[in-house]
Amino acid sequence: MEGQDALDMSDASPTSSWEDGAVEHFDVASFGGEGYVVDDEEMSDVELGTGSPAGPSEASTQPPPPLRRRLAPVESSDVPEEVVRAVDAVIMGGGVERLREMVSEEDGEVTHFIVDVLMITMGGVDGLDEGAGDGTSPSTEPSIMSSSRAAAIAVELMPYLPCGTEPSPRTRMACGLLATLSACTRNRTMCSASGLLAILLDSAEKLFVKMGQSRDWDGTPLVQCIQVLGGHSVSVKDLHSWLLLVKKALGTRWATPLTLALEKAVGCNEAKGPAVTFEFDGERSGLLAPGDSRWPFSNGFGFATWIYVESFSDSPNTAASTSGRSSPWAVAAAAFIHAGEGANDMPRLFSFLTADNDGVEAYFQGKFLVVESGTGKGKKAPLHFTYEFKPQCWYFIGLECTSKQGLLGMVESELRLYVDDKLHESCPFEFPRVLKPLAFCCIGTNPPPTITGLQRQCPLFAEMGPIYIFMEPIGPERMARLASRGGDALPSFSSGAGLPWKASCDHIREMSEDSYTLDIEIGGSLHLLYHPSLLNGRFCPDASPSGSTGTHRRPAEVIGMVHISCRVRPAESLWALACGGPMALLPLTVSNIEMDNLEPILGDVSLSLATSSLSVPIFRIISLAIQHPGNKQELCRTNGPELLSQVLQYLLETLSKLESGKKEILRDEELVAAIVSLCQSQINDPGLKAQLFSTLLLDLKMWSSCNYVLQKKLLSSLADMVFAESACMYDANALQMLLDGCRRCYWVTREGDSIDTFTLTGTERPLGKVNALVDELLVVIELLIGSASSTMASDDVRRLVGFVVDCPQPNQVTGFDTGSLAQHYMPLARKQRLSSKFG
């Protein structure tokens, strides 16, 4: 533990004053200020532990703890030295038992002091009270924590802290930890490396499942801590513990919040970034690439990377005050005026400069990107883009400058900005004519002024993925393909590059082939390529074709301290969790099974209610997870559409039996929206998408057992999707399936292969509601026919006419204008027959 803590301390700054082992030198004056407000009329009782020997003991003779007004730690000279020594001893490797004894003595003042010392030792809680107390909306500059060991101790101690009148010590500790984790990626990386997620899950199990005294405590900040840290990185073991905790929490009010936290972790913005990134701390870190004997950008240049900016230099209200009523150009200009031309707080993206400071630089002014060209004699020509970037969001940023000779001999230059996979802006740009060699190529910050003669330091506080620097523009199409490929790919320009034959399915093989082709196309234009997974010590080797083959060795040197963040995304852990990948979540939606055939059946009512409430977030998790190629392959390998259909049918029947005309268990729009999202998730696989539509959305017999509102919501959702998903619905044979479903489910006069007008619970369906559903269904059918191409007109008309002729319920289809549709589509069908006859 001592070695681990020492590692944490070496990775962060500043170092806490009592972590150097010399307790007698601790400066208690650093705690000054007003932290406690004791009001004799507002003394609170600490919630007492029952059934847990380790919980706070019941001691009626002790005075209740004082009421704390603030969440943030105090600055008071009254901190007892005993508390400081005890916390310091635990951080240095001692057991946490002494702190448990101190918090169990029911001395609220000492308990609050322990929380204060742990929060200050941990660090990263700046602006806790200003951030609305939840740590998720910081209003101050993010700060890097000092010790992940202190965070682990705080979480381990959390179940034993009292939770009386809020803000209680337990709530303050949870909110402080949430603020630290939300502050910046570096904090999450340190805590993830120290195994904090496992400790969080263990403490949550003690609080939500085992300890009876915590039933009234609002554990939302603790669940948010699990969500934030899990969204950064979650191992397979931790994910398994997470799901076991959800299972154990069934029957409590925390099963659904824990599942929703997993859903948010899978779909969070941080999970969209590269798995390995550079970490620039915003103080003195960056990459310094070697110079060149010539100016390599005579034909323009290109730059591409993935970036997650922790904070920008502007005040929170600078851009917001103008963006609501002004054009993007006015907002960008306002940010430039606010920052000032000579300001020192412009985070630097890159600098390509000669010894005379001629060249190109890119930096942020406020939340806007500025590219500046230096044309000699100190002349600068900045170009301000209008795209407003948001902090703590992943972006793919691409810049390229084209330079071509005009008709009159003038050089015409254009600068393009790509955000994600789209060309956002293209503007004329004064690209400098540089004759001197490239002296400085810097990423993230400028080199020290003593080296370059520059008068300002512009550090970048951000995460960055692979960095591509091109000697010429590569064009919008290749830039979009590079963005779509993602930041995980490490190009290999040797004879073994790509290896498409190792792909385990068609989609992965196509991705591998496209990646291999892209590497060949951009290899000749690539000047430098720095990938974070290659960083070794103080140098990062060049992975471009000339660098990887050894023709030119141009490693980048680390300026200051550059850390590497490695993460395991939740979707990847779901793939490795079990056979079937995300399909392993489906048992959480089933309350009981038939042991003979393993078919899901209705179990205990309370358990069925609990499992049914988890179904919506689990369907949404699956829809997010199967966008990962491995998870999609597992879905297909385990006959996922059929399995999902069986579970959905069980769920709908369960809801019908449990509701019985009473209050609905799930909100209709949430369930239908989750199924729609699941069906629409497969953009690159039309076959699987059509199969999901036919098994989950178009089977009306499965949905007919639900309440009227749920069925109406389904049909209205289908109507909304007709034009956007017309090709998929055609592949799924939607028209015929809906016509057959109408005959089986919505006829008043019973047919042989139809269900009656009674639900499974025996409650009769009102005729008016049945007819209303028929009207909604016929709207969908009419839209389907209207969106069909002329080549399908004859088949659609034939099906429709057959449906109307065989219909024994003439009064139920009066709202459907069959004659007008037939009159409109008969000429198209006749034209198709003539073209097929003479073509």
Image (cartoon, rainbow, N blue to C red):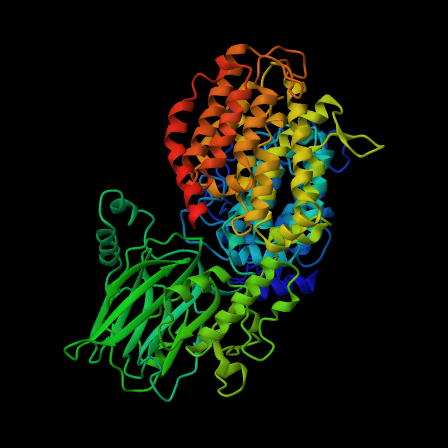
> Which of the pair 85/277 is nearer the observer?
277
Q: Is residue 41 above or below residue 221?
A: above
Q: Position of residue 471 (x, y in %)?
A: 37, 78
Measured as percent of width and height from the top left, residue 355 is found at 31, 84
Q: Is 508 placed left or right of 604 in the picture?
A: left
Is residue 192 among the parts visible in the rendering? Answer: yes
Quadrant of res 225: top right
404 lies above or below 255: below
Q: Position of residue 393 (x, y in %)?
A: 44, 53
Which residue ends up furthest to the front in the rendered image?
838
Tell me: 196 left or right of 730: right
Determine the residue positioned at 14% across, 78% down: 408
Residue 118 seen in the current view: no
Q: Is residue 814 or residue 29 the one in the foreground?
A: 814
**Whole-percent x, y for residue 467 in the image:** 46, 70
Q: Hey, which quadrant is residue 244 in on the image?
A: top right
Q: Is residue 644 above or below residue 478?
A: above
